[in-house]
Image (cartoon, rainbow, N blue to C red):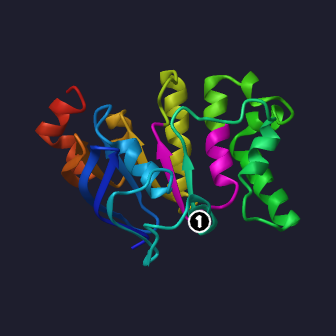
Amino acid sequence: MLLDVQDLHIAYRDIEAVHGVSFSVEEGELVSIIGANGAGKSSILNSLMGLVPARSGTIRFRGEDISRIPSHVRARIGIRIVPERARVFPRLTVRENLRIGLYGIHEPAKEKERLAWLYELFPILEERSSQYAVTLSGGEQQQLAIARALVSDPKLLLVDEVSMGLMPKLVDQVFEVLQHLNRERGLTILLVEQNALASLEISRRCYVLETGRIQFEGASEVMRDDPRIREAYLGL
């Protein structure tokens, strides 16, 4: 088991946003967490990355309890996040943004190799490498955010609301990239997303979050056909 989360509680002062959720992700899986806005999805990812402290519960990564270690240590051991709404560094160039993602890599040859691979995956980033990130379109910034997380060769990629604010065509492209990374490169991905149908189409398993609690879980293919899921989350 790559990631094992047990009885996770997350609170903001006196308001508890996540109420004792438990879930797991095996190495090589693409697992999605779907739910309405405000269900607690982003809080879970931010807690896994160490950006939001858990009130209680246990987070194990590769068998090690990482519940209390800081974000930079989690990044060093192989966890990276693609934050909601991209959140690139607007006054840095594309290349500078990517080099920030190289935290923990000290070998120049490996840096060149990773950048070459990312430019192959996202050709537009090579074309825009000397441009400031603020000049990129929304879709290009989202590609940059994904590339910045990938450049360090993570073992677990946390992806937060990657479709938010993107045109449908760009949403399809981004989900195709995630699917490619998982199926062709074997990258383990935990995807948090409001676009439930798109998530179910590319993920292996799914958890459904309602008001901070997991209400349903199972194989994504089965979940797509569940009348309760179809009516409540897929609008079918």
Decide which of 55, 22 is in the foreground and name it. 55
Q: Quadrant of the C terminus?
A: top left
Residue 81 relative to residue 4: left or right: right
Residue 22 relative to residue 172: left or right: left
Q: Which residues are magenta?
A: 144-161
Residue at image mark 1: 78
Above or below, 129 against 103 in this view is above
Residue 114 x %, y %: 76, 57
Residue 146 belongs to magenta span: yes
Q: Residue at x 18, y 42 (%)?
A: 225
Q: Residue at x 44, y 70 (%)?
A: 2
- Tag 1 secondary structure: loop
Residue 161 visible within the image: yes
Above or below, 111 against 98 in this view is below
Residue 220 visible within the image: no
Above or below, 187 against 81 in this view is below
Residue 112 relative to residue 83: left or right: right
Residue 117 x %, y %: 74, 53
Q: Amino acid at mark 1?
A: Gly
